Image (cartoon, helix red, strand yellow):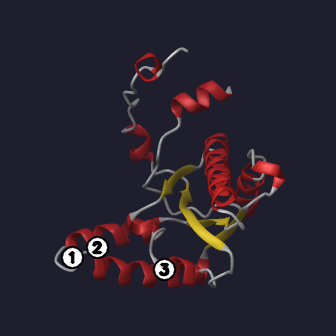
Amino acid sequence: MSILEALHSRRAVRNFDQREVEQEKIQELLKAATLAPNDRMREPWSFYVVQGEAKKRYEEVAYDYLQERFPAKQKLVDSSMEVVKKTPVIIIVTSDIASTEADTKDNEYAVCCAIHSMWLAAQELDLGFVWRTRGIGLVHDERSYEFIGSPEGKKVVGTVCLGYPEAKELENMKEKKRTAFEEKTVWL
């Protein structure tokens, strides 16, 4: 599959079957992430792989968060928790906080590139992938930061949900309509 084909066919996968993801495949994704462009080779990313017992603890944190955020929407809490429980691997991705605001922003951009590199690599490895920045990704909630041990100088940028896609998820995927680049481009 060419890079352009991968970009055209990339989709967010939110429903996974219960197969475990092989350690080698997770390592390949992490290797792909470290190939991302980054300013002055600061390599500002860190990855926190959540599986097994840690995933059970993450589920508790997610449940508390969802209960607090949606106290009158138990169905939403339950359906969101079902997704979390069925996700085989969760990777919390952080960016280094630098000494200047500009460098910190550059680091965040690099981490976004790293996550996208992982997404394209996941596709080649027949894995489903979704990058969450809100909701059950807990990215903007202090609990996510605390869950990974409150590392100094780090900011959570995204939560990656990873696994083998459910067959029906793949069957129901449609090509997304995108705005043509001509409508978003100004030639100067």
Left or right of 127? Residue 85 is left
Query: In this rendering, does residue 84 appear at all?
Result: yes
Vertical relation: 62 (above or below) 9: below
Residue 74's disc number: 1
Residue 32: give x, y in percent of width and height. 75, 48
104 is higher (above) or lower (below) than 3: below
| Viewer-proximal residue among 179 and 38 | 38
Residue 24 found in image quarter: bottom right
| 24, 65: nearer the viewer | 65
The residue under the point 21% across, 71% down is 75
Residues at discs 2 and 1 in contact (Cβ within 8 Å): yes
Q: Circle 3 — which element?
A: helix
Please state if 96 lies on the left or on the right of 178 as rendered. Answer: right
Chain-order first, disc 1 or disc 3 = 1
Screen quadrant of the N terminus: top right
What amino acid type should be assigned to the residue bearing mark 1?
Answer: Gln
Tell me where residue 51 appears, x and y as whole percent.
61, 74
134 left or right, relative to 128:
left
